[in-house]
Amino acid sequence: MNNKKEKGILAVFDHPNRLLAAVKKVRQAGIRKLDTFTPYAIHGLDHAAGLKRSWIPYATLILSLTGWCLGFLFQAWTSAVDWPLNVGGKPFVSWPAFIPITFESMVLIGGVSTVLILFITCGLPNRKLPALDPRFTDDRFGLFVDKNDPYFDEAKLRHLLKECDAEEIKNVA
Amino acid sequence: MEIKGDKIIKEPLVAPDLVLADVNRDVCRPLESFPSRKWYICLAIALSALSVGAMMVTGLIGKGIGVTGLNQPVGWGAFDITNFVFWIGIGHAGTLISAILYLFRQKWRTAINRSAEAMTIFAVMTAGIFPLLHVGRQWYAFWLFPYPNQRLLWVNFRSPLLWDVFAVSTYFTISLLFWYTGLVPDLASVRDRCKNRVRKFIYTVLSMGWRGSARHWNHYEMAYLLLAALSTPLVLSVHSIVSFDFAVSILPGWHTTIFPPYFVAGAIFSGFAMVVTLLIIAREVFNLKKYISLYHLENMTKIMLLTGMMVGYAYLMELFIAWYSGSPNERFIFLNRLSGPFAWAYWIMMSCNVLVPQVFWVKKWRRSVPVMFVCSLLINIGMWFERFTIIVTSLHRDFLPSSWDSYFPTRYDWGITLGSFGFFFTFFLIFCRVLPTIAMFEVKSIMKIGRKESGAEMYAGVVARTD
């Protein structure tokens, strides 16, 4: 595999609980540069791997509110400033009639930006880092430890991972 | 769910003998083998219907919308708007399953959400055709969007019809993104199974290089939750706004405050009927009975029973309010619906939507596939006639008896309606062949795997703490 960025050890597990236990042990050994590859999200794994709660909700909140304001201001501007048009004797900014579109623009901008932010933060589309093992999207669970970690000690790690019932341990270079 | 003694026995969501590796293999099988004869027959029927529709649409665009049954006084909609409301309604069940059931942590949704969401996308696409045709000069349809133009005009933001443009286009965009986001990990699974180079390339591009890293899952789960949270009010708003098209006007039978919840309940009702119809066929043709079990179908019949009764309540309340309002026009419109020239449509609606779902009180019938299939078809027919009744009976006899007339659909109306079914089913059949019809990663996450395996128990403490 012509993988220039990732070098280290990859352990393959056949059960999420084994992966979870291994992640805890590897973290206890002081290693921080690790990643796991799983076919589905495993509850508790993000916590065990030392990941914080995703910050995406804050971005969604801000962008949704921006969408709400933009939607309303655009309607008010077209109806009252750019071309004031008297419709049925109502005020130019007849705000209750603007609420449905204001709501829709909130959802549209909030939703589209959430998806874009998700892809950007995850570095997708990703062409540089290939899947380390095709089984990780099927029924196997992988733990990758980066060589650059200051606590990286290959012999020790191999021993530790074997203790955790890793099905297979291999070098990624 | 069953109660035996002091224990509650829950039905398994997937067949208990399955292991993780079975999921990818079973769900991807239709993608990796040549289509069966049954599939070709279905596609041929769908394409024939679609071509009839395409011919009629060509004629309609060439000659103008006068070729349909539109005339005074039924000058708005009839078939066009009936079909529009019908198809938009179908779509709502998909979003209910994917977003609302997700927020309520209903694990049984995992087997059905992918195909229900696909149904949503295709139903909204089908629905979109009708207002587009209905505008008359279809080549100017883009005037519906507010964009700077040399006429210096803006659209009228106070019009419910414009709210509809925004609601439906937002609904389509968000549903598509929600669907695609949900597909990415599964597309990666398909990619990793591919042997053919062209296929591999296509699924690599589509899956965008997803590899299931813990960091990615962390953000992914959160973004998915947010999309569900945004889609939930969105789906309620869309059919409310569709109902404003009617409720904001002053016509008797349309001008009622009950319309938004009544339309939303009806949309979910008809949508679930369509999901049941499609899934009964799909689980048979693609051999997915281990994943889409009777338990899933039974849950959906329960939702149909509930929403069917909500719709029935709305029908009765409409009648009551028409009488209670004391308005002679309101009273007349409902008497005309019950006993006028379109009474047959009203009674089809009443019997299919209110009486038919009552069979689901009986557990034996809730778990019988033939009963479910027939009922879901009848409900769809009933819901189509509900929209037909609302639109035609209110328009054909309004305030002035001198302007009363009837409504006569032409072959264009029937042809385009048939074509819309062809359009929808063509897309759905192709979907079943090129994308995984079951959310594989979500099904894997609810499977009880290896609990009895040796060694698994020793880590049980770890799971208990982190859960």
Image (tube, rainbow, N blue to C red):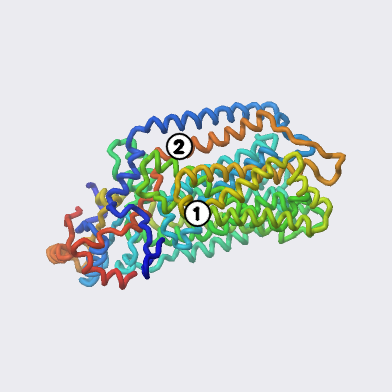
Pointer 1 residue: B362
B384 sits to left or right of B111: right
Structural distance between the alpha carbons of marks 2 and 1? 32 Å
**Residue at left offset 71%, top offset 48%:** B154
As rendered, which of B357 and B260 lies closer to the eye? B357
As rendered, which of B356 and B197 lies closer to the eye? B356
As rendered, which of B11 and A5 lies closer to the eye? B11
| Chain of the residue on which disc 1 is drawn | B
- Say above or below: A44 vs B301: below
Q: Quadrant of residue A172?
A: bottom left
Q: Residue B388: where, in percent of width, then height? A: 68, 42
**Residue at left offset 63%, top offset 54%:** B311
* Amino acid type, callout 1: Val
Mark 1 crowd level (few <14, some 14–19, many ≥20, 10 Å Cα): few
* Amino acid type, callout 2: Leu
Q: Which secondary structure, mark 1?
A: loop
Q: Residue B51: where, in percent of width, then height? A: 55, 28
Q: Residue A106: where, in percent of width, then height? A: 58, 58
Q: Which secondary structure, mark 2?
A: helix
Eye-nearest disc, 2 or 1: 1
B86 sits to left or right of B250: left
**Residue at left offset 48%, top offset 58%:** B101
Res A104 visible:
no
Mark number, residue B429: 2
